[in-house]
Image: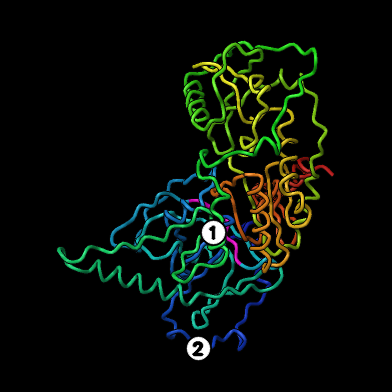
Amino acid sequence: MKRELLAAAPTHEATRRARWSEVALTFDQTDHPPCVARGGQIAMVVSPTVCNVKLGRVLIDGGAALNILSPAAFDAIKAPGMVLRPSQPIIGVTPGHTWPLGHIDLPVTFGGSANFRTERVNFDVADLSLPYNAVLGRPALVKFMAAVHYAYLQMKMPGPGGPISVHGDLKVALACMEQRADHLSAASKPEGGDERLGTSVPTAPRQRMITCDEVPEDALVSFLRANADVFAWRPADMPGVPREVIEHRLAVLPGARPVRQKVRRQAPERQAFIREEVARLLEAGFIREVIHPEWLANPVVVPKANGKLRMCIDYTDLNKACPKDPYPLPRIDQIVDSTAGCDLLCFLDAYSGYHQIRMAREDEEKTAFITPIGTYCYTTMPFGLKNAGPTFQRTTRISLGSQIGRNVEAYVDDLVVKTRNQETLLSDLAETFENLRSARIKLNPDKCVFGVPAGKLLGFLVSARGIEANPEKIRAIERMRPPANLGMCNASLVAWPP
């Protein structure tokens, strides 16, 4: 008995989540659909937002003990830094057992711009030959404290602004049901019959908008496909900003003596990485070989947040010889505040942003750097130069000046399109794309997010409700246990001074 009592003792996490239980969830006549769909035989299929991506064909399954994500859907929403952790085999879904690729925690959002909930859900990424992109089981429903009414094909959950109602998509559910039936029929045929039908999840467009419904494409996806020319899929698709619009110049102080840095030793694995980066930059046309440069810098290999490596150039000496560009950068707090109250947001990322701006020809050789295979200089604006940020900010002001402050905000290479009313989303994007097209600025489709109610901007979580704390930044505080004795109270006071 003592062991059971200890096991049932409420934790701090359970106490924190219990506040949602104060919201009453009811179904009444207003929720009743025009007709009841086949007496509960139709599955509940919804389209939540997962990692800022609208994910279609998500099955709500109150009988599942796991949350499943298909590999195709994971590849579509995968962002830098996402790493799958080892997982246990899945038993009971398919004959025998299935080994997932791994499991991962992802943010899942339900609701609209004025009232929505986001919770981190643990998914097992596995190919179970299902016609769904994902399955949300009991663990996810418990996190959201959701109630599902299968007769009404409706799910309700507590939200900051009252109950959130999520309606199932009847057409998509029927399409999934037919696809599943065809798959089972083909699988049951004896050998020598028709080839087993595949049930692959429809591929997501590269603009990170997943629309897997077997119904006509929505207006946003059609619009993005019609404007595919504003995206660059590889460096060859990126012509660069015309020199007549802007180019980066180095205003080296008169009398400044050129500095040639001595070659620094690099570990063998880092030398190999530098060789790979030089080959990639040469192929992209971002650098060229140079002989007898007056200025010479060393490459520096630094780790990124996702564990990968990045090659930077140590332009310390060159930067000391250049005066700072006084061009003003916008205030981050004002940009973040201006997004409050918007129905929808679009987060844009320029493809190799700085490299879309060319170096002035007379300043190219000043950016020279030494590598194990030779000396090279940049023909496009590299990272690490003192005034690269102001130059890119000036570029966005030139191209998007008529929109900045109205329906676009820009901080260097971070762009967000603000839509106050969701009916104007396409017109806001059309105006933005036209201005970017005039400056020949290309976007990276893998890092752009369109038409979402909330997202991360300059380190903050912004939505129609305003600014919220980034869950990744406060996770350690949320997981802190309440002090259980006087000593722990004193330690908390020391750790958090007034």
Q: Nearer the viewer, mark 1 or mark 2?
A: 1
Which label number is shown at residue 1? none
Q: Residue at x 66, y 48 (%)?
A: 438
Q: Is residue 109 magenta?
A: yes
Q: Amino acid at mark 2?
A: Cys
The answer to which of 132 and 28 lies nearer the viewer is 132
In the displayed structure, does residue 142 sit left or right of residue 129?
right
- Disc 1 designates what residue? 226
Quarter of the figure with residue 264: top right
Give the magenta part as a residue range. 104-110
Cα–Cα gap, marks 1 and 2: 37 Å
Asked whether the beta carbons under mark 1 and mark 2 sit within 8 Å of each other, the answer is no
Q: Amino acid at mark 1?
A: Ala
Q: Quadrant of the C terminus?
A: top right
* Residue 402 drawn at (x, y percent): 77, 52
194 to 367, vertically: above or below: below
- Disc 2 designates what residue? 35
Q: Residue at x 53, y 34 (%)?
A: 308
- Residue 421 showing in the rendered view: yes
